[in-house]
Image: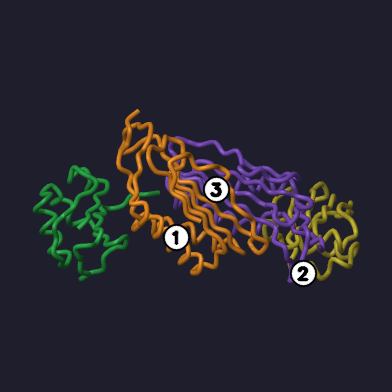
Chain colours: A orange, B green, C purple, D yellow
């Protein structure tokens, strides 16, 4: 499940439990109060939306297969994201915890290397 | 050819989208045209990837008149 | 923050955002529908509560320091935990994601090796 | 000495708590008394750890009359 949205990312994110899955691992990447040492009030994100959406779907599928996760959720917020709010949410459901942990970690590395989404501006406090 | 500019590439080009006459050719040829039209992209060239029709172009890939090409500066999502 | 409780673990768990922390990683360990190949309706957990509580606190502190996490939450449910509900919740807040991921993974390994909590019975469906 | 039994150890002992006369000594001596009082603990001995006053006993640690000792079979939380 992939979504790009401009509203706040819900917490909890509505994740459907699966009877075979004993592990739900989740990650929120939250905007911090400083950027390059300066206090800020928000970061602005933009994306090449169709390409980002398609790459995120392909990545979720690839890593779900690789690690044996049954379901992956990825949500990236775009536009202005205030300090303390999440720019990204990631969740993985798997039978056992190691698969879900490995997926989150791999997914974030790949996302930060390849997915066409940018932090374009920091809005000063 | 339709060109999409994102992030620093949009700032440098001064636009988010443009139409570029391009008869077809490889990335080298396309960059030559891009830099002729938008000289301020020059400092970004080394770090900017090209996407053709929504996918990163492979090394040696050729670009044609009808393609949508996106300039992808270093990404910073998450 | 350590809690042992017999009620359902809330989701979302009330976690306080910290301005320096860009990463919130969470884990729910959920009771699966089968135990040893048989369908079940719940698992029963018990703990040596004072020892478990004290060890969980010490472990949270040790691993927060080791990995550079600013805050750790750990909640274990005791008594009967129905299929599809969480027996454990773990969360870590850190400046960067790798610290929070590493903490969750290490914490679960240590918990499963040493903390005096037991799955005592599987209740058949 | 107050003894606490958990999980399989409670099942084997048939109780969750007991008082055991114990003059003091090491784990070996304590297990001898425990098995005399609760012979059905014998199969658990190899995998069961002892906690003294809420902490796992170190190798060679001594147990005294006033201690609270817990029998900790292999844990399975999470």
- Label 2 neighbour load within 10 Å: few <14, some 14-19, many 20+: few
Q: Are marks 3 and 1 on the same chain?
A: no
Residue D4 as seen in the image, left or right of residue A4: right
Total marks shown come to 3
Q: CA distance from mark 3 to mark 1?
A: 38 Å
- Quadrant (top left, top right, bottom left, bottom right) of the C terminus of chain A: top left
Observer-nearest of D9 and A80: A80
- Label 1 neighbour load within 10 Å: few <14, some 14-19, many 20+: some
Q: Residue pushed farthest left? A: B36
**Residue at 84% over, 50% down:** D2
- Label 3 neighbour load within 10 Å: few <14, some 14-19, many 20+: some
Q: Chain of mark 1?
A: A
Q: Are marks 3 and 2 on the same chain?
A: yes
Element type where label 2 sits in the image:
strand
Element type where label 1 sits in the image:
helix
Q: Who comes first in sequence, dot 3 or dot 2?
A: 2
Q: Which residue is mark 2?
A: C38
| Circle 2/circle 1 CB separation < 8 Å | no
Element type where label 3 sits in the image:
helix
Observer-nearest of A61 and C63: A61
Q: CA distance from mark 2 to mark 1?
A: 34 Å
For discs 3 and 2, the disc positioned in front in the rendered view: 2
Observer-nearest of A37 and D49: A37
**Residue at 20% over, 65% down:** B63
For discs 3 and 1, the disc positioned in front in the rendered view: 1
Residue B9 as seen in the image, left or right of residue D58: left
Q: Which residue is mark 3?
A: C62
Percent coordinates x, y for residue A57 in the rendering: 44, 60
Q: Which residue is mark 1?
A: A57
**Residue at 63% over, 49% down:** C89
**Residue at 47% over, 54% down:** A2
| Circle 3/circle 2 CB separation < 8 Å | no
């Amino acid at each position: 499940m992939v979504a790009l949205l401009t509203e706040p990312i819900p917490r909890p994110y509505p994740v459907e439990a699966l009877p075979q899955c004993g592990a739900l691992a989740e990650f929120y990447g939250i905007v911090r109060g400083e950027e390059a040492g300066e206090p800020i009030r928000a970061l602005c994100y933009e994306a090449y939306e169709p390409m980002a959406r398609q790459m995120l779907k392909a990545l979720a599928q690839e890593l779900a297969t690789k690690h044996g996760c049954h379901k992956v959720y990825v949500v990236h917020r775009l536009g202005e994201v205030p300090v303390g709010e999440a720019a990204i949410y990631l969740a993985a459901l798997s039978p056992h915890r190691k698969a879900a942990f490995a997926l989150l970690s791999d997914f974030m590395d790949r996302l930060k290397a390849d997915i066409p989404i940018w932090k374009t501006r920091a809005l000063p406090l | 050819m339709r060109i999409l500019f994102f992030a620093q590439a949009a700032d440098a080009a001064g636009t988010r989208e443009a139409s570029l006459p391009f008869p077809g050719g490889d990335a080298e040829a396309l960059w030559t045209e891009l830099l002729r039209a938008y000289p301020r992209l020059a400092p970004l060239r080394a770090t900017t990837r090209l996407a053709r029709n929504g996918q990163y172009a492979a090394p040696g890939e050729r670009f044609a008149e009808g393609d949508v090409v996106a300039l992808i500066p270093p990404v910073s999502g998450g």
